[in-house]
Amino acid sequence: MSSMNLAFDVPPRRELPAERRDAMRRLLEDAVAGRPARRALPRPALPRPALTRRALWPAAGLATATAVAAAVLVVGDLGSDGADTAYAATPPVLAAELGIGGPARAQLQSLAATAGAASPQLYATAADTTVVTESWLLTVTETEAADEAPPPEGAAATLAMGAAPTVTSAVVPVLREQRLLADGSVHVRETQGEARFPTAEWSAADDAATPGAVLLDETIPAGGLASAYPAQLATDPAALREQLLAAWPQAGDPAATLFRALHELAANRSLDAPVQAAALAMLAREPGVVALGAATDRRGRAAVAFGADSADSGLDRRHVLLVDPDSGRLLGYEEVLTGDPGELDVKTPAVAAYTVFL
Amino acid sequence: MSTLPAAPPDDQHLWSRARRGDPAAFGELFTRHSTVVYNYCFRLTGSWKTAEDLTSVVFLEAWRKREDVAAEAGFVPWLLSLAGRVARNSTRAVRRHRRLLAKLPPAVIAGGAADALASPDSAHSPGDPPATGDTSPAEAREAAARADDERHMRQVLKVFRRLPKQEQEVLALCVWGERTYAEAAVALGIPVGTVRSRLARARAHMERLTEAAATKTAEPRPGSRPEGAHHT
């Protein structure tokens, strides 16, 4: 073959470092010994997600890459009787999030008007290129799930492969800064937040990352972070609704889906005042959106909370948007598991995910 | 009169035992094929350290997918197809097995591309000189050679990743994984003829891209050594 073909000009083989190879073999043998194949594996009763987006953020993997650093829910060894399972650490549920809720229309309309009339300084503009968030996600991987299927958003379970039902974790948020550069590329930097709300089993050994540790620092070429949503978002509420739902063709609960869509948008691009006003007006018209009252967000900011319940993902879940009462700006998004968590070892109600828009 | 030593059990026999929960059989399969998987992962990622991590993950995935009948058609091709998937979705795969991987001792390769798990193209500088504090001259030479490998492989991958995904799969399995057409066909679930045609296209495509890249590169890499697959 021609030497002008790089595919045939690769470095020679090398051996695994012996110490590492031996350790790997021991690890694998332990994994096999801990759960022999002959035993019937009880399938976790983790419901499958019922909906998927039409298109995903291609770089979502980058974002979720660092979900490793977020809390990991450990369900006990599949071969065990469950007595030795541990509960995952989750952030405290905000006071307003579990309210029965009341009509939201008037309040959302008022906030939409506030947003529409807000001082430009309170909002992003088209020139703003940086989005900063703090987020946390209850990370779950369903071991027996179809390989290519994404885990249920916001919750999944890591099923320990080995014999030992290992430890739970603490809530470790990720700080993310996403900056649009002049050439159309996007620079993403994620750092480890401070571990919080440790469970009794939390140990230093479990703390794989140091606060401030850089988890991701990468520039994605122009076009590499394509969005599932149009570049030009409508400022008409009905048109915006159509744009957002188009990305979720299988959605069964439009209100909750709109919450999710707004979360995705706000976590990945700056939303200017007209779009946020349209979003609030859109939610004001949406059946299923309830007002949950005043709240304080995870950064101590005053907020008003709105909720939408859904079981689209397979678990009863409340989606919450936190809005700045003074400007109508989105401050945060949260998901709270409210019903039977199935095989997930969390005590409901439990926060499954949150994002603070900074 | 001497007796002939017993032939070592073949892969399928070991795999059958492993699937029934025999740790030693699985361990033997690992010992037998870890080098192939390790080098394959390196060629897909351009990082020895990432390849170390992914080698563990590939075997953990093999155990997780032990009911997959494709393994019975050819264990190594199946392993390499798993490796390809793991390399493409490394963050998810590593996350899935994070707890177990944490039990391994730290990677021992200096100068490895630690952040290449998130993206093999990330801004790591594999050519950074290895730590020299307590390293012997032999270790330093090994580290330097591996760093050189990484620099070289990343140049290759820059071109390789411009191929269509289907061509990448075939080229990787047949050339870098040193699988036959038939084995690649089984691993990818496509006819042998399709493997041949895709590989031919991939070679031509790669050659054009190589030439294009060469025109942009002022410094050809000295001492490169062709290493290709032997196909039947």
Image: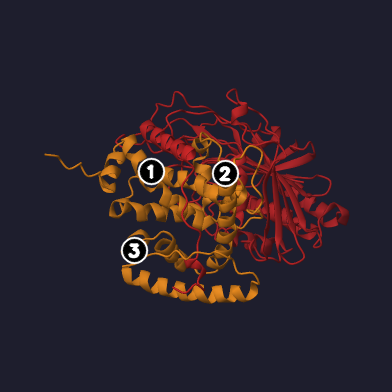
| Side (left or right) of A340 relative to A298 | left
Among the two numbered marks 3 and 1 on one chain, the one whose residue lies closer to the N terminus: 1
- The percent position of residue B181, horizontal first and vertical second, equals 34, 66
Whole-number angstrom distance, CA of label 3 to CA of label 1: 21 Å
Q: Amino acid at mark 3?
A: Thr
Which chain gets the red colouring?
Answer: A
| Residue at x 65% of width, y 33% of height | A91
According to the picture, the residue beneath numbered tag 2 turns out to be B139
Residues flagged by tags 2 and 3 on a common chain: yes
* Numbered circle sitting on residue B180: 3
Q: Secondary structure at mark 3?
A: loop
- Callout 2: helix, strand or loop? helix
Q: Could you tell me if residue B103 is visible in this image?
A: yes
**Height in image: A313 above or below A180?**
above
Residue at point 52%, 27% (across, down): A86
Question: Which chain appears orange?
Answer: B
Q: Nearer the viewer, mark 1 or mark 2?
A: 2
Residue A321 screen position, x and y as percent: 69, 45
Marks 1,2: beta carbons within 8 A: no
Residue A278 bears which disc, if any? none
Q: State the colouring used for the structure image.
A: by chain
Q: CA distance from mark 2 to mark 3?
A: 35 Å
Q: Residues within 10 Å of mark 2 (few under 14, many from 20)?
A: some
What kind of residue is marked 1?
Phe
Residue A78 horizontal/vertical position (percent): 41, 33
Front-lying residue, B105 or B110: B110
Mark 2 or mark 3, which is nearer to you? 2
Is A94 in front, or is A291?
A94
